[in-house]
Image (cartoon, rainbow, N blue to C red):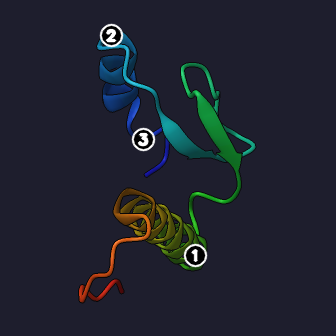
Amino acid sequence: MSIKRSASLTKEAIKLQLPMIAVVDSDADPFGVLYPIPGNDDSTASIHLYKSLFYNAIADATKNEILRVLGDKQTSCLIV
């Protein structure tokens, strides 16, 4: 979602002090975005790429946390 097109959401996140991660195009003001990701926010292909990268990072972190919590315990759970 473009920061320029979602100005009301950006203002609300700043008001609620929510950290924002956003793809910031060269024509947008990154004010209020804690983790700006430089890139094209207009291209469907780039949005799908970002979505895939975020999904994989979250899945990997979740898997690693489960493994950390389980430690050396033997388990029959399947982690995908």
Q: Which mark is residue 15?
A: 2
**Residue on which disc 1 sits:** 49
Please tell me in which quadrant of the rendered image residue 67 appears. Answer: bottom left
Kind of residue at disc 1: Leu
Q: Where residue 18 appears, x then y in whole percent?
A: 37, 23
Number of numbered discs overlaid on the protein picture: 3
Q: Mark 2 and mark 3 in contact (Cβ < 8 Å)?
A: no
Q: In the visual, does 49 lie left or right of 70?
A: right
Q: From what the image shows, is residue 66 above or below residue 18?
A: below
Q: Where residue 29 appears, x then y in whole percent?
A: 64, 27
Q: In the visual, does 28 lie left or right of 74?
A: right
**Residue on which disc 3 sits:** 5
Please tell me in which quadrant of the rendered image residue 32 appears. Answer: top right
Q: Residue furthest left?
A: 76
Point 49% across, 47% down: residue: 2
Label 3 CA crowd tier, 10 Å (few <14, some 14–19, many 20+): few
Q: From what the image shows, is residue 51 above or below residue 24?
A: below
Point 56% across, 28% down: residue: 33
Q: In the visual, does 59 lie left or right of 42?
A: left
Kind of residue at disc 3: Arg
Q: Earlier in the sequence, mark 3 or mark 2?
A: 3
Q: Where residue 42 appears, x then y in whole percent?
A: 56, 62
Kind of residue at disc 2: Lys
